[in-house]
Amino acid sequence: MRMKRILTVVGARPQIIKAAAISRAIAAHFQGRLEEIILHTGQHYDANMSEVFFSELGIPAPAIQLHVGSGTHAVQTARMLEGIEQHLLDLAPDIVLLYGDTNSTLAGALAAAKLRIPVAHVEAGLRSRDRSMPEELNRIVCDHSSTWLFCPTGTAVRNLVQEGFPDHEDAQPTIDRPSVVLSGDVMYDNSLHFAQLAAQRSKVLEGLGLQPGSFVLATIHRDNNTDDAQRLERLVRSLLSIHADHGLPVVWPLHPRTRKRMDELLPADLMQRIEQGEGLKLIPPAGFLDMIALERNSRLVLTDSGGVQKEAFFFGKPVVVLRSTTEWVELLDHGWAVLVDADPGRIANAVQYYLAQEMGVAPALYGDGHAAERICAALAG
């Protein structure tokens, strides 16, 4: 059987983390059947947001770096399209492997599909039903450009069927006759694999002077939260209120872009309260092992990140979602997450509710921890 060459396109830290599961599966079980080359678009270009993850997670260093950097959605995507297309022409891979819903995903899907190179999409079928989110548009375009659609949940499969996709796997799929695979979630694979390593290596709790179960974890990075002054102010004041109302510090790993927007948009008196440490512990973007340690040892998680929603759930932590929609509807259906948008009253009520709850054992919603092997087997043929 001929070895297949895969070009993996990543650009943001969640994609790098997801790619770790596939790279690990290829190295362990598919040597001689799959060859992986990693292309990093540079969508996340800060070392704390990108480079540290390759070394920390044991992923092969990217063979190709585009260094695209920041820009508007159009500018960023256009630069990626140009760079990815040139490397596709040079490398002639058998498959382009994409993750999630970023501009890197969109660019990779368009460049590959137009060159008639089959696309494999990990996290296919996710829908928030909110097309005002750039991520929703990206994931829809990628799905409809893909030959393999690897779905983390049954809900994702049903979403694709409703859009006209087949509800089965195909041994020899094409872009016009794609294969829909219920693979499970590669992030669940990673959480199982790295949880013990994080417990051994991470010193983030000691560095912050925190005990397990003594703090709330928050992340905020989406454009509609960071670029709207009123929303951002409401969210920050809500985080400060958690400490005032419940005596729990809020640990906030701060995306560089979010910090920039805070400096630009928030009132001076509010920034002063933040800097004086009134219940908010602002830290640089956390490495994956530190993030696992924070999620696993928190009381509660507030986030607008899709990935953090799931990771918190994997460790039995309820999630207050700082959005009006979520692609992870299973968490809502099973009571492990609640949508609060940027409404201070709803945020306060949700925090109060979850801090008083005993959540019990989390149900198995995202597979069996072998999603990456299932994906590789389908691609190897």
Image (cartoon, rainbow, N blue to C red):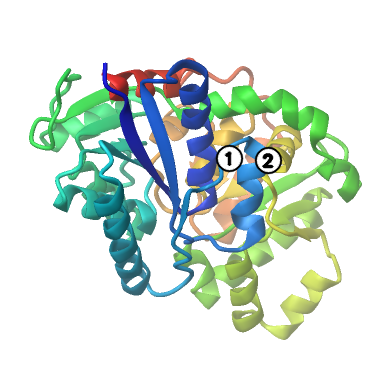
Q: Position of residue 106 (x, y in %)?
A: 30, 54
Please, is residue 283 above or below residue 364 in the view? Answer: below
> Of tags 1 and 2, which is closer to the observer?
2
Rate crowding at label 2 as few (under 14), some (14 to 19) or many (20 or more) other CA atoms within 10 Å: few
Query: For the point 21% across and 39% down, which residue is it?
Result: 146
Query: For the point 44% across and 27% down, which residue is it?
Result: 185
Quadrant for the N terminus, please.
top left
Nearer to me, 106 or 163? 106
Kind of residue indicated by mark 2: Glu
Quadrant for the C terminus, please.
top left
Nearer to me, 198 or 334? 198
What SS does tag 2 mark? helix
- In the rendered structure, the answer to whether residue 206 lies left or right of residue 253 reads right
**What whole-number distance in Å separates the C-alpha atoms at marks 1 and 2?**
26 Å
Q: Position of residue 14 (x, y in %)?
A: 52, 46
- In the rendered structure, the answer to whether residue 281 lies left or right of residue 46 reads right
* Marks 1 & 2, CB-CB < 8 Å contact: no
Instruction: Quickly name the residue at label 2.
Output: 56
Instruction: Quickly name the residue at label 1.
Output: 319
Q: Earlier in the sequence, mark 1 or mark 2?
A: 2
Task: Answer yes or no: is residue 131 visible.
Answer: no
Query: For the point 30% across and 69% down, which residue is it?
Result: 78
- In the rendered structure, the answer to whether residue 68 lies left or right of residue 296 reads left
Query: For the point 61% across and 63% down, which residue is it?
Result: 46
Please, is residue 181 above or below residue 55 in the view? Answer: above
Count the numbered circles shown.
2
